[in-house]
Image: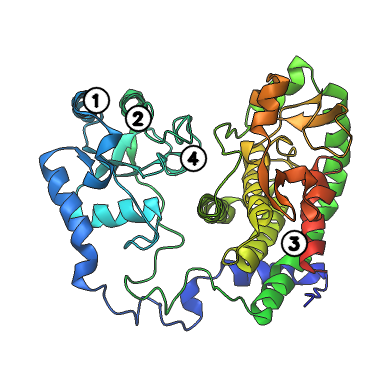
Amino acid sequence: MRRVVPGILGVTAAALALWAAPASAAPTPSAPASAAPDPRYSGHRLDRVAAALAKDPLYVDPDVDVALGAADRARVDRAIRAAAERVAVPILVVVAPNPTESESQGKDDAFLSALHGVTHRDGLYLMVDDDGYMLGQGWNVPRDIDLDVVAQDDLPDYEPPDIHRPFGGLADRLIKRVDAWAAAPAGPPRSSPALLSPPVPFGQEDDHPLVPDKPTVKSHFLRGFLIAGPLSAVALYWAGIGSAAAGRRWFRRGGTRGAVAGLAEHAEAHPGAPAKPSDRWLRRTASAELDRLRDRLPDASGNRGRAFALAAFDAAQILYDDVHGEPGHALDLVGVIVLARQGRRALAGQMTAPPPPCFVNPLHGDSTRRRSIALPGDAGGGKSRRQPLCTACSGASGKEIADRVLRVQGPDGLAPHYAVPGVWRDAAWGSRGNDLVKRVMEYLGVE
């Protein structure tokens, strides 16, 4: 069913007010005033980890004990203790799986926040999950550390260098992180921001699902009416103005050193992203990227990229609601990831039209230059075409490019993403006009 949304700018203020209103404004069973306390067994893992951290600042869960060998554990342990002495607060490191079925529902920041509530120890906390991704948080840390950034993915050691070896080089990554914390200048005590979307009470997930498995037309209509219509109109108006100028600058400077430096300054790179991602990886990554963009929006007032980020978030969220529980939507999930990352890119760079993603594999992140390349299975019959590429792909050989191409299941089996019919092939991930959000909204039937 098509979702018809009037693009009336006059309701923008009301839409923002309703969107920004706390969840407690509406009577829901999960409101703090009426929620029953978590069952005691829900804290068993937290109690176990907290007890281990009381004896040693490094905890490696038995399920991932291969993450660090004995020698590496000793090195990391020494580095943690030395860094903690310099920072003058405890540094606690946890290497453990964090499945969606856990008390934190797969949210690493929620796990660390809950762990802090159990340990009652202020300081710096660092978690590495079973995919090798790293996240840190802090409470009352007397250092000039941007704890909002630490809690996100803006540091270079956030993700493993090789997606197929999640714990490759983990000891060095951990030591690098704690050493960076120790080297930060002194400052007033600071803490990580409170969770914007805490997990529902443990054991009640089925009663309060984080994302409805079967979103209703009403929920789509309300979200589209209150957000997509007015905000998309604002976003697309300014994106049209900004993207025209940005596009001209992009094509004029494409391939020059100045263009590469300018775009790479804030570019998000994910060169280790899989070329043949599993459904599980796509669903998990799409959910995480939506969370990251959602967490940045409340603090984006006055940011030139806010209108684009809001429109990108709305498109990504509606798309995710539609397809995340259904098989056979790999490219749509890639689209959710791309839209969410572009929303964050717009905020980070204060831009009305972020650059398109790498065309070889949109999961690689931002493109930084254009280059003529021949892609396997392209409709151009093997001819070279000028495409936006990430830094890693812009310097790759023809064979390396072929190996890096994103492949997903199409009508005839595994195929390059640009050979699979649909909106993503037609829109070319925004590489030929910066109208990706608009095209996706049309695809979703939002007018």
Report the residue at 81% width, 61% height from top: 233
Circle nearer the N terminus (1, 4): 1
Q: Identify residue for label 4.
A: 153
Camera-nearest label, 3 or 2: 2
* Residue 170, label in figure: 2
Amino acid found under the numbered disc labelled 2: Leu
Report the residue at 82% width, 70% height from top: 8
Q: Residues within 10 Å of mark 1 (few under 14, many from 20)?
A: some
In space, the residues marked 1 and 2 are separated at their CA atoms by 9 Å
Q: Is residue 120 visible?
A: no
Q: Residues within 10 Å of mark 2 (few under 14, many from 20)?
A: many
When the figure is inspected, residue 157 is found, relative to residue 220, above or below; the finding is above
Circle nearer the N terminus (3, 2): 2
Asked whether the beta carbons under mark 1 and mark 2 sit within 8 Å of each other, the answer is yes
In space, the residues marked 3 and 2 are separated at their CA atoms by 42 Å
Quadrant position of residue 374: top right
Quadrant position of residue 40: bottom left
Amino acid found under the numbered disc labelled 4: Asp
Circle nearer the N terminus (4, 2): 4
- Secondary structure, mark 1, is helix
- Secondary structure, mark 4, is loop
Q: Residues within 10 Å of mark 4 (few under 14, many from 20)?
A: some
**In the image: residue 442, left or right of residue 264:** right
In space, the residues marked 3 and 4 are separated at their CA atoms by 26 Å
Q: Identify residue for label 1.
A: 72
Residue 9 image point, x, y percent: 80, 67
Q: Identify residue for label 3.
A: 231
Q: Quadrant of the N terminus?
A: bottom right
